[in-house]
Amino acid sequence: MTYGKGRTYKKVEVIGVSDKGIEAAIQEAIGKAQSSLEKLSWFEVQDIRGHIGNDGKIGEFQVVLKVAFELK
Amino acid sequence: MTYGKGRTYKKVEVIGVSDKGIEAAIQEAIGKAQSSLEKLSWFEVQDIRGHIGNDGKIGEFQVVLKVAFELK
Amino acid sequence: MTYGKGRTYKKVEVIGVSDKGIEAAIQEAIGKAQSSLEKLSWFEVQDIRGHIGNDGKIGEFQVVLKVAFELK
Amino acid sequence: MTYGKGRTYKKVEVIGVSDKGIEAAIQEAIGKAQSSLEKLSWFEVQDIRGHIGNDGKIGEFQVVLKVAFELK
Amino acid sequence: MTYGKGRTYKKVEVIGVSDKGIEAAIQEAIGKAQSSLEKLSWFEVQDIRGHIGNDGKIGEFQVVLKVAFELK
Amino acid sequence: MTYGKGRTYKKVEVIGVSDKGIEAAIQEAIGKAQSSLEKLSWFEVQDIRGHIGNDGKIGEFQVVLKVAFELK
Amino acid sequence: MTYGKGRTYKKVEVIGVSDKGIEAAIQEAIGKAQSSLEKLSWFEVQDIRGHIGNDGKIGEFQVVLKVAFELK
Amino acid sequence: MTYGKGRTYKKVEVIGVSDKGIEAAIQEAIGKAQSSLEKLSWFEVQDIRGHIGNDGKIGEFQVVLKVAFELK
Amino acid sequence: MTYGKGRTYKKVEVIGVSDKGIEAAIQEAIGKAQSSLEKLSWFEVQDIRGHIGNDGKIGEFQVVLKVAFELK
Amino acid sequence: MTYGKGRTYKKVEVIGVSDKGIEAAIQEAIGKAQSSLEKLSWFEVQDIRGHIGNDGKIGEFQVVLKVAFELK
Amino acid sequence: MTYGKGRTYKKVEVIGVSDKGIEAAIQEAIGKAQSSLEKLSWFEVQDIRGHIGNDGKIGEFQVVLKVAFELK
Amino acid sequence: MTYGKGRTYKKVEVIGVSDKGIEAAIQEAIGKAQSSLEKLSWFEVQDIRGHIGNDGKIGEFQVVLKVAFELK
């Protein structure tokens, strides 16, 4: 990448879900998005939420994030 | 859907327009999005706006919303 | 376009980059988005940022914007 | 209206109240504003609130909105 | 109520769900909250969301709101 | 005022300035607005700012607020 | 209180009303909340609003705040 | 202007439109507002948006801004 | 849970504290809230903050979150 | 100061604490900042919070504000 | 710069003023900040405001921005 | 620290980067800030973002936070 050269990026909003933790939920979403979109450059976390199981434990983390990639 | 299993959702921003009311504008957008995207799971209203006719009546409702669906 | 008729728009988030200025960065993103999406109707600026070169000059403008088009 | 021609709009913040529903409260405000301001072009809902009666029913809807018109 | 007299209100956040529409979802939450809290005075809508059924129709409206009542 | 009856309010944004304190700045704006607008019903503080004198003391308080009145 | 030890706080949203000023309205809400909740630790102001009397004077201050206390 | 002296300002929300650029759209709104309101002191940009022509070029810039003037 | 059936949820704001990490602070708050409230369904993170010890290490994480449960 | 001349200001975020009231907390922060920074021009309040004593009285006000000064 | 390597950046809030336009006001602030801080990497625009002259023309642009640089 | 005594804190915005996780990125920034600023008291996370490597894995976490310390 060369700074100053005209170029365009696109941002897409995804939600990754994992019972392993916040980082794992982010990676889940990035891995899935990478396979259907083009090569991803960066992510921005928008919201962190989750499900609570009947036992009062965190059942899963749901992380809303935006992923960005260059439009060629 | 089973909680705790790794999965990924995508959110898309659409605007539904209808002269019938707010709920009809939401349904308009969901119906159109459903036909070009995959099966939708939920929606989130972002903004409610509208056009005003020459007679000072609400001409149409424009509802900005996000719709979400699972990325398989 | 006729007001009051049911219709649906979609908004997509893009980032335009240019070393010419803010308007040029917006045009960069619109031009690129127009070629891969359908005919665009309007844009909304979300954020204005940029890179600073080693000489302390603005190296490039990065304008985050949403572009909207009708879903036919 | 011709796009590209220099022109100016003004936005005014009003609150419409009705016991009929959200759409009726919006129309209430637009009708009253139309009679004291110039011809209105569009509205943007800012907030939806309301009064609750002694019987635990919604007593009225109070919708805060902005209405816009061209400054000639 | 007399203006100017010292008094205190409490706000509680609830979510009303209904398949009838936005106003019905608000009334659902107010009715349930009224039965477990003290007499409610007003409500403020925070968010409007909903579930989408398999048929691409709005399955239900979920309205997040705050209800307020006087602490005696 | 009777709840449930259709009616409309207007909100106007003003800034009151005073070297006496925050409450005095609010009263300054309300007093001036009352004389040029119709009878005011309530106010909402938006921002509190101020000038700092050469001696490092608060020179004046500038309180941005909205005042509301009924459109008859 | 010892930093680092696992513990949990709860925040409750209240509105204090007083014709004496902003600080008095905050104290009004804290005093009333303290008598029905557990020992309070801190407060956070959310909004400052008020009623305007027929004479164009501030009739009362309404301060929306959150109060927090430890859940034992 | 003397700091510390009680005074009141009013803010009005306007939208300037121009096909020349962002600064021109701001000037368009200020010029029109100046002719119908009193002498303006400052402006604050709220939003930058625009129309996109059939040729994929920016058709016009629409800049939402607030202008402020002293209430004498 | 059956979608479409009228029901009501309540959200409560809590702060979980732990020196183990962000996930542990969330679990701390959920575990404590679960024991004094009804069965919890989900959580939403509002803020992540923390204390810094004299040695320049993170002393504890303080996570502000909302927990939600159905009002039966 | 002459309007139109190129110049640069810097904003710094500080928190003033006082048991006297909100204005006193602002002055506390400005006085301390003035002694370590250059001559301050204005302030902007960001947040108002405080500690509550064991007796249920406001123990102190904590006002988060930004102070600005010219970079010469 | 190598991605993945531990490093720390600092952001500083500045306001650039110029009668030439928005880009010139940004460059004004960056140039002045560069001379008193370390080498700057990027900027983020926070707010665009300005002064209006007696002739109803934009007297100057005031752009609030954050500049970031690496803490070595 | 004694509550009620006049004192002043300063907040500084930093960005910590680490490939280990979110907590590690926070600690990275605190450790570096501690060495150039005075003794830090607390931190507040503002944003969580990151770089994505060519392999579709999270390359690094970038956590924007504010750190606060007492101005003596």
Image: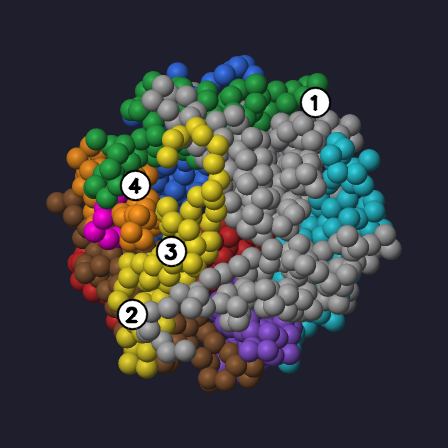
Chain colours: A purple, B brown, C red, D orange, E yellow, F green, H blue, L cyan
Q: Which mark is residue D15?
A: 4
Q: Position of residue L3 (x, y in %)?
A: 75, 38
Position of residue D49 relative to residue A15, above or below, is above
Q: Is residue A55 left or right of residue B52?
A: right
- Amino acid marked by disc 2: Asp
Q: Is residue H32 magenta?
A: no
Task: Please state the extent of the stretch shown in magenta in the rendering.
Answer: D16-22
Secondary structure found at label 1 = loop
SS state under label 4:
strand
Horizontally, residue F42 falls left or right of residue F57, namely left
**According to the image, label 2 marks what residue?**
E19
Q: Residue at x 20, y 65 (%)?
A: C6
Query: In the image, what residue type sits under mark 1?
Result: Gly
Q: Which residue is mark 3?
A: E34
User: Marks 4 and 3, Cα distance to the nearest angstrom?
Assistant: 26 Å
Q: CA distance from mark 2 to mark 1?
A: 60 Å
